[in-house]
Image (cartoon, rainbow, N blue to C red):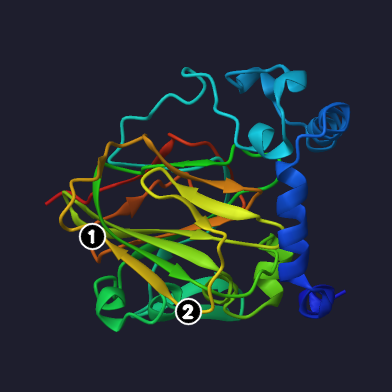
Amino acid sequence: MSDRLAVLPQYLMPKQALTVLFGKFANAKAGKFTTSLIRWFVGKYQVNMQEAANPDICSYASFNEFFTRPLRTDARPLAHSDLLSPVDGAISQFGTIQKDQIFQAKGHSYSTTALVGGDNQLASLFEDGGFATLYLSPRDYHRIHMPCDGRLTRMIYVPGALFSVNPTTARGVPGLFARNERVVCVFESAFGPFVLTLVGATIVGSMATIWHGMVNPPRSAEVREWHYDGQQIVLKKGEEMGRFLLGSTVVMLFPKGTVDFNPAWTPTKAICMGEAMGMHPAK
């Protein structure tokens, strides 16, 4: 079956209604039923609870509390690298932005302008720059950390669809990551600006950041934006910056000439938060 045919049902299903419904379900505190659901999920997806700060399945009051669980402080040592992987997951794609086009999958690209919600001036900062798209599967740790030190300058909520973001859908839905609902976080760093984008998906009930809390819901039909120039919201490399309530994807943008990606990285490779993502080129 072709990828485009495989994703056809997603065009027809009520994705937003399912997402809202599952979000309420995942927040429910249903006692033994919640514990049974978590135990089933751990078994099905082979979740390593020994890495969790609290490995006791019975202690989680809701599914979302389990899903966004913190890890032990020693579970993800930080590599000695300029840029770190911000998440556990798998590499979807990474490399050079071709003028303003980000490679999604064979036959599919999308523009930096579309990704950041239509801001041409912001997108132009990353012309011929670097990008990395990282996919978080259901089994992964779902907190997002900083790839490097950064000062937050803007956050943009971009409304959109709620397609799945798994590899089959990435191959079958054109412009997937610029079509789905997303939260674009813009930072300044020692090497210039960078963007870290949280992309929503089917049954991803919400996305949250540590400075704002829950960004969605509420969901809006309009682009919403927050500016932080007057605040000193500075996060260190490896610090938590946000989380997904159910799995999704992170897309990062870097200016031209500021990143040489880890030569060991390849598409589909499993990665852990804190491992080396890249270095700044030698001057």
Which residue is found at the position 46% from the left and 62% from the top? 183
Tell which tag, 1 or 2, sits nearer the viewer.
2
Residue 231 point in image, percent of width and height: 18, 50
Image marks 1 and 2: residues in contact by CB distance under 8 Å: no
Give 31 or 36, whichever is nearer the viewer. 31
Residue 158 visible to an observer of this rendering: yes
Question: How many residues crowd around disc 1 within 10 Å: few (fewer than 14), some, or many (20 or more)?
Answer: some
Q: Which residue is mark 1?
A: 193
- Which amino acid does the dot numbered 1 rest on? Pro
Left or right placement of residue 85 versus residue 255 in this view = right
Q: Seen in the image, is 6 located left or right of residue 87?
A: right
The answer to which of marks 1 and 2 sits earlier in the sequence is 1
**Residue 166 horizontal/vertical position (percent):** 69, 60
- Mark 2 closeness class: few <14, some 14–19, many ≥20 residues within 10 Å: few
The answer to whether residue 266 of the structure is visible from this angle is no
Where 70 sits versus 262, above or below? above
Residue 206 in percent (x, y) is at 59, 54
Q: Residue at x 74, y 45 (%)?
A: 26
Which element is circle 2 on? loop
Disc 1 is placed on an element classified as: strand
Report the residue that reaches farthest toward the left: 283
Q: Which mark is residue 222?
A: 2
